[in-house]
Amino acid sequence: MKRSRSTCSSPSSDSVVELTEEEVARLQSRQSRSRRERRLEIALRQGDLDRAQQVLRDQERERRRRQVQADADLARSIQARADEEFARSLQARRSPPHAAQPRFHQHHFASALLARSSLRGAAAQEGLAQIALLNGRDIDQLDYDELWELSERIGDVRRRGADKREIERLPTRTFDNQASSAEEQSCSICLEAFAQGERVRTLLCLHVFHAVCVDNWLTMNKICPVCRIPIDKR
């Protein structure tokens, strides 16, 4: 985590208070939340339901943005830890004997599980290393078949993803702003508003996304990114 610091002056003294970027972000988030709450309160007092609904939608978008950022930060942290462990194992390891299956293939296989995963898949990759340690083995000492067996035990991310045929069964349409409800105005994955004429896809739970955004998501997870309902649930 970055530890660069910002400074601000105390209103009651000449002293300067140093804040980390995380503390500054939390302070700004609280201030932004307070402003939205005031706008919502004013809109409700004035009976302006349209404005109140817009404030609530803004709050939901901000909540999702923070969740996406938190997920990305955690995934990067897990990836960094995995890279550090691999670098340490390379430094400690002596020249390995010739093997029919080179060890770097095993590392690439393990890294691929992490790279193709969502947040849950990243946690599963960490679980794979933990299972290996419980068995008294380093993950780099496992052969290809053993890695596959372990990945199946913890839930290989590729088995959770949908194939192209499953994704194409889900309906798509051209977005029409006039014919869409207020709840269907933006994509919850990229957080961008739908543009007139864009191709969108609707899941069985009726949540709507940019087709490109949700297709990429579904190759890793067969669930709605908003409500977590499986796409093949009937």
Image: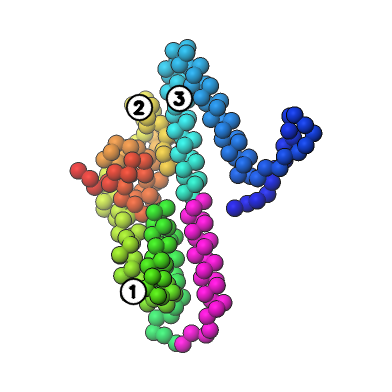
Q: Could you tell me which residue is drawn at 77 percent across and 31 percent down? A: 13
Q: Nearer the viewer, mark 1 or mark 3?
A: 1
Q: Position of residue 54 (x, y in %)?
A: 45, 24
Relative height, residue 124 to residue 233 (above, below): below
In which image quadrant can residue 56 be found?
A: top left
User: Label for residue 146?
Assistant: 1
- The residue at the far bottom in this view is 97
Of circles 2 and 1, which is in front?
1
Residue with the mark numbered 2: 181
Secondary structure found at label 1:
helix
172 lies above or below 166: above
Label 2 neighbourhood size at 10 Å, few (<14), some (14-19), many (20+)? Answer: few
Q: Which one is in front in this view, the residue at disc 2 or the one at disc 3? A: 3
- Confirm or deny contact between disc 2 and disc 3 (CB under 8 A): no
Mark 2–mark 3 distance (CA, rounded to whole Å): 13 Å
What amino acid is labelled 1 in the image?
Answer: Glu
Which residues are the magenta region? 73-97
**Residue 54 numbered mark, or none:** 3
The local crowd at label 3, few if under 14, some if 14 to 19, many if 20 or more residues have their Cα within 10 Å, is some
Name which residue lies at 52% across and 75% down: 89
Q: Secondary structure at mark 3?
A: helix
